[in-house]
Image (cartoon, helix red, strand yellow):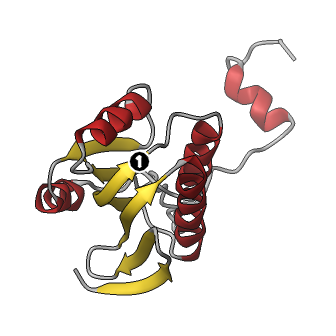
Amino acid sequence: MQLHALIETNGISIAYDQVNDWIYADWKGEHDQESSQIACELMLQCLRTKPCSKILNDNSSITITHAHTTPWGPDWLDAMLKSGLEFLAWVYPLEYGAREETELALRFVTRPTIATFDDIASACIWLEKRKPFVPEQHFVDHDFMPPVVRKGPALRNKFTHRGSDQS
């Protein structure tokens, strides 16, 4: 990964990976509800600064977490979606309790597509294989000339039989 630093705090480092066109969020140390929400808001800020469809969310350096599912979580995910996020590779913390909390939080999430991993290498491989949604493009044929629409007797004659007295 070739990382361009975006934000550096005690609890999270966020960088943009130019080669892979994704954001790398490296969570560190102990996190509670407040620090987790602040870090998530920083991730959203970075996504808006460097729009991309993928995030590598590395929690392997979290030592302890006391964060739980909260009402702001779905709103944050919705804001991330609106900012272009389609795929999130989530690397589990090494602490087992934090893993359970992650699984509970992600159980009902359908968008963005989130996959969980035990190591960064597996997460990178999965993320590399994800193809961002590209809206269907409609091409205009500039050489195409639409038929001329005529009003009056010519149009009426097209739908009536020759020689009929119908007007």
Whole-percent x, y for residue 100 in the image = 31, 32
Looking at the image, which is closer to me, 85 or 139?
A: 85
Looking at the image, which is closer to me, 34 or 22?
A: 34
Would you say 48 lies left or right of 107 here? Answer: right
Q: Residue at x 52, y 54 (%)?
A: 36
Which corner quadrant holds the C terminus?
Answer: top right
Query: Which three-letter amino acid code belongs to the residue tagged 1?
Result: Thr
The image quadrant of residue 4 is bottom left
Whole-percent x, y for residue 46 in the image = 54, 72
Instruction: Report helix, strand or loop for mark 1.
Output: strand
131 relative to 96, above or below: below
Q: Residue at x 56, y 47 (%)?
A: 33
Whole-percent x, y for residue 86 in the image = 42, 51
Q: Residue furthest top?
A: 165
24 relative to 70, above or below: below
Q: Residue at x 25, y 48 (%)?
A: 92
Residue wearing tag 1 = 65
Exactly how many numbered labels are in the figure? 1
Instruction: Using a 10 Å C-alpha cutoff, classify the residue at mark 1 as few (fewer than 14 neighbours), some (14 to 19) or many (20 or more).
Output: some
Which corner quadrant holds the N terminus?
Answer: bottom left
